[in-house]
Amino acid sequence: MKRLTRDKIIYQFDKNLSPVLEVEPRESILLETLDARSGSIKEDAYIPSTDMKRVNPATGPIWVKGAKPGNTLIVKIEDIKVSKSGWIAAKTDTGVLKDKVKRSRAKIVEIRENQIKFSEKIIFPVKPMVGTIGTAPAGKAISTAFPGDHGGNMDNNDIAVNSKVYLPVNVEGALFALGDVHARMGDGELSGTGVEVCAEVKIKIDLIKGQNIKRPYIETPYYLISTGYSSNLKDAIRMATQEMAGMLVRKMEIDIEEALMIISAAGDLRICQACDSAIDVTVCLRFPKLILGLQG
């Protein structure tokens, strides 16, 4: 199995970057990742304002043989191993209550035996997920801090072990990268950080040729999940709903009105990222595969 070390990182998804690894479809790869501040926070400390050009480093880019525009890249998350410590922060420039924060500070937490030790009294279980995952866009480069049609910083808790992420291939080779792993993150990431960690992520990459998707979607053993993003929550919800409705129309051979009926009856909308910063609000819409006869 090929390994890509955490010194091979990018801070933007960019079609002009040179790949650092070449893989075949259906090949497994182990990616070492850095935390959201590139390993610079090692102790409890007051921290500087976030530099949006140097946040969420992603390991890559990876060239996938045979990937061409109009294909779909499938990335299965096979395993996530997180570091023995991480950090979490409250900041003056990010978060829904940032006006209440007197000075941005980070706290180091220990991670042992699948438990996160915030303090002697506060301990909660590890629930690892991947925050940033994507392919290079066909147009201008996009910072790893931001979401987009290429994927990017979706901060979706469903991007976890045994999930598959479907990403559009916009340029030859796809130029895939992944990073911003959290040992745990609450939906919304309301202070702007989860438990930020370095990690090792084992993935398997595959291709669907001839399937041209506009935006990412996610599949877990139990759900199909559409995604949406915007500076406006209402628009993000509309995007995710439109994406899910389109999937149901195609998969179930129903009309749009019927798709909207069953979404309203059985779909669950979740806010992924809403930390009141330069980063767009991201949402996802989960629909049970059991209803579609696809569970398993």
Image (cartoon, rainbow, N blue to C red):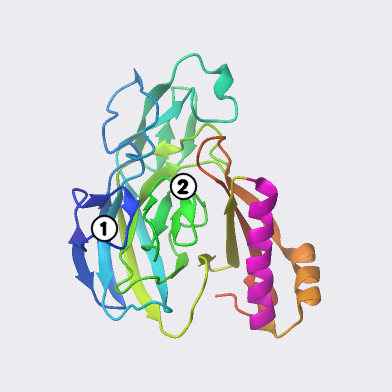
* Quarter of the view holding residue 83: top left
Indicate yes or no whether the magenta region holds residue 268: no
- Kind of residue at badge 1: Gly
Q: Which residue is mark 2?
A: 127
- Does 284 appear above or below 255? above
Left-right relation of 193 to 224: left
Q: Position of residue 289 (x, y in %)?
A: 63, 72
Left-right relation of 131 to 173: right
- Kind of residue at badge 2: Lys
Disc 2 crowd, CA 10 A, few/some/many (<14, 14-19, 20+): some
- Which is closer to the viewer, label 1 or label 2? 1
Indicate yes or no whether the magenta region holds residue 233: yes
Q: Position of residue 109 (x, y in %)?
A: 37, 29
In this rendered view, identify the residue nearer to me: 83 or 63.
63
- Does 283 appear above or below 296? above
Q: Which residue is mark 1?
A: 60
Find the distance from the CA under tag 1 to the CA under tag 2: 24 Å
Identify the residue at horizontal 26%, vertical 36% (top origin).
Answer: 39
- The kind of secondary structure element at disc 1 is strand
Q: Position of residue 250 (x, y in %)?
A: 65, 82
Can the viewer see residue 1?
Answer: no
In this rendered view, identify the residue nearer to me: 175 or 142.
142
Identify the residue at horizontal 55%, vertical 36% (top origin).
Answer: 275
Q: Which residues are magenta?
A: 232-250
